[in-house]
Amino acid sequence: MWYGVQVQEELKIAGLMFNWMPSWWYRNYGIEYGRRMYFDPDYRVETYLRKERLIHQRYAPMPVGQADPQPVSLMPDFQNPVTALAAGAAVRYPADNYPANDHLPEARIRALALPDDLSQVFPYSEIDRQAAYLNARLGRHDLPWWNVRGAQNDAVLIRGSDFFGDYYADPGLARHLLDWTSGMLERIVRRNHAVGHRGMVCITNCTVMMVSPRLYDEWLLPYDRQVNELALGFGQEFGIHHCGRADDYLDCYRRLPRVDFLEIGTGSDIARVLGAFPRARVQIILSASFVANASLNDVRREIDRVLAAAEGNWPRFSLAMPDVEYGTPDENLLEIWRCCRR
């Protein structure tokens, strides 16, 4: 779960966000994830309230978390394996990590067909069930949300690393699986809009860095364009999560009709990205391993370098610190915040 620094006017930039890993919660406070986090809505809300208070207390004076949080109808998003679950993959739910799925055998992948009614398919049916339960119990009207993913991300989760070889050894299988994952994504975007969601549609392109820009253009760009045009047609913003080095893919993404938000990974040329997308909001993902192991001075120098690269574009530039692991010094996170303050 993401925690944004809440007093935006204190920041030089548009935003600063942190995400603490399940292992961090488990080893510091004994908070377990496991199946219960995804199948017990009361436990999930109770845990949310506790986590908000703990973060608020631990990182004061940084304005993150809440001293007096109120219950919300927190949906179970099932994390990365959500589409693999719909494909029938087995999923493990460790106590100290996010869920992880097994890959499907080739025969089951070839048999995949898009469902007529996704609301009757697990885990989407379970998300809706828990949303209705929590709204009734808490007297709220929070809209159920189905996790938006990415075509190749889901294909790799379902097929495993063999999927990359399929582009060359079995392109028919690769096309079939991408058609299925993209079809699922399109149905999810349509359904989210139908129940009232009007926020940004942001696809996850974590695995794009594992293929060449030429292959992306040939195979994946048409799928991303379909989602892009669907979101824009609904009057919604469109974003891309690209957690690797983005430089080689900027020309590819510029072929999309419009990109409103682009999240890029460590090592990306920040100034080049901002110049390539002059109207988009850009967010840089800080390296979790760097922040966990760097000295305070090294953290300060890196944040100063990042901010200097984005200077002149701070109103549309933000930082994200995902995957905060157990052992990451609190002072390093506070130093990131201090560097970003006015």
Image (cartoon, helix red, strand yellow):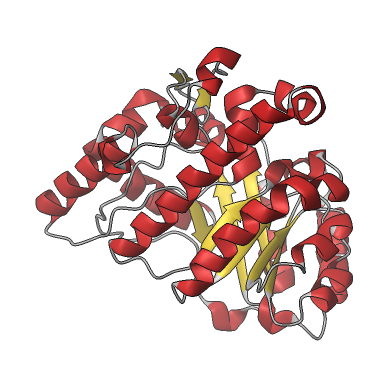
Give residue 285's quadrant in the image.
bottom right
Residue in the picture at 42% in, 22% down: 88
Identify whether 49 is placed above or below 230. above
Give residue 225's quadrant in the image.
bottom right
Identify whether 34 is placed above or below 197. above
Image side of residue 233 versus residue 238, left or right: left
Residue in the picture at 87% in, 49% down: 214
Residue in the picture at 41% in, 50% down: 187
In the rendered image, residue 124, in percent from the top left (x then y), is placed at 32, 40
In the rendered image, residue 119, in percent from the top left (x then y), is placed at 27, 42
In the rendered image, residue 19, in percent from the top left (x then y), is placed at 56, 49
Image side of residue 247 versus residue 78, left or right: right
Image side of residue 302 versus residue 60, left or right: right
Image side of residue 250 versus residue 316, left or right: right
Q: Quick check: can you spot residue 297?
A: no
Residue in the picture at 68% in, 41% down: 328
Q: Nearer the viewer, residue 124 or 105?
A: 105
In the rendered image, residue 31, in percent from the top left (x then y), is placed at 41, 32
Identify whether 113 is placed above or below 209. above
Q: Quick check: can you spot residue 19?
A: yes
Count the marks. Answer: 0
Q: Residue furthest front?
A: 172
Q: Nearer the viewer, residue 330 or 248?
A: 248
Q: Nearer the viewer, residue 144 or 39?
A: 144
State which quarter of the image contains the C terminus: bottom right
Q: Nearer the viewer, residue 158 or 289?
A: 158
Give residue 174's quadrant in the image.
top right
